[in-house]
Amino acid sequence: MSSEKLMRALQFELPGDPKEVLRLRQLSVPMPGPGEVRLAMQLRPINPSDVLQVKGVYGRKPALPAIAGLEGLALVDALGQGVIGFSIGQRVVPLGVQGTWADYVVTPADNLVTIPDGLTDEAAAQVIVNPLTAWIMAVEELKLGAGEWLVQTAAGSVVGRCLIQIAKLRGYKTLNLVRRPEQVAELLSEGADAVLCTDDPKWMDKAQAIVGAKGAAAGVDSVGGSLGGSVAMLLKRDGTLLVYGALSMDPLKVAGGQLIFRTLTIRGFWLTDWKLRTPKIQRDAIISELLEAMSKGQISPPVEAVFPLADFQAAIEKADAPGRSGKVLLAN
């Protein structure tokens, strides 16, 4: 009888709808090589990037068959040769690794972020995608100052809610665009400065009145299409629009005159690219500052529901459903 240790893993052999192409497999537990650490995964968020990768339309495409998942909280399970500074059972998150929707994953030791004691498992599981994306866009990329306006689409998302929380911490103001009227009061109660439902035919007039004649310092868009273009129209001269998602899957629609006569800048932001091009010492300092704020409860990404790994189809369906106020997590 074989004594090989096996693990569960959500694997896909071809791109497609995750509910259809993912299979819960029994695979060999990976062994860490020199300089590597084996992680026992605990909680894994279902992010749009995870779903898009399985569908085959994400910027990072793994060799197939592949195990899904790009983020999660783990416990250090085994150390490869030469690894120091980590102990078995220590809470960590990998800073970008393929295959977190499994019981175990192996990654280089220098790819790990240690989680402080004051942070809950649910918050820690989300650190590396949504809170970090919000923090980098607001603090590092846009460098928003006290009193400046930020306009954002999909404000009810976890990234959107984190941007609202960071605004309270850093002193900038948020104009938040949502699709559902009931989200207006919800986000206002969470500290948003202004919230408008884009179903209101007069939302653009109201938005212009809020940001004033000068306009907003910056915008962030994860929807695209005409809505993303409308955000550009709300920016001040020399303003910047960061595009970090494309939920509508429609091309961003911006009039050339907006770019030319107001000298606007529109550029993409991809967290994976930021991780690759940012020196480790700078990257670690930024993440440490974020973790400190999260440990103090100043930034708290919400959780909608937690599902067992084996119930991935129900979890993905929940994550796709409109009206969520937090992230859906996969547990063990």
Image (cartoon, grey):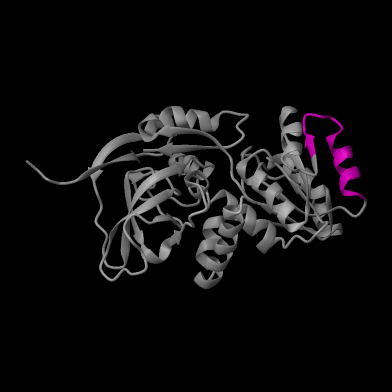
In the rendered image, residue 170, in percent from the top left (x then y), is placed at 73, 58
Answer whether residue 27 is visible to the viewer in this image. yes
Vertical side of 328 occupied by 134: above or below:
below
Does the rendering let one see residue 17?
A: no
Residue at x-position 61% and y-position 42% = 158
Most foreground residue, 90 or 194: 90
Question: Going by the image, does 61 lie left or right of 167?
Answer: left
Which residue is most to the right? Answer: 213
Which span of residues is magenta-colored? 195-212
Q: Is residue 265 magenta?
A: no
Work out whether residue 144 or residue 166 is closer to the camera in this orientation and state it. Answer: 166
> Residue 314 location, x and y as percent?
44, 27
Query: Does 58 sit left or right of 80 as displayed?
Result: right
Question: Which of 252 and 312 lies nearest the eye of the viewer?
Answer: 312
- Residue 301: x %, y % from top left: 59, 44
**Residue drawn at 36 percent across, 52 percent down:** 75
Asked if residue 12 is positioned above or below residue 199 in the image, the reply reads below
Q: Is residue 243 left or right of residue 321?
A: right
Quadrant of the image occupied by residue 249 = top right
Identified at 33% across, 34% down, the residue is 23
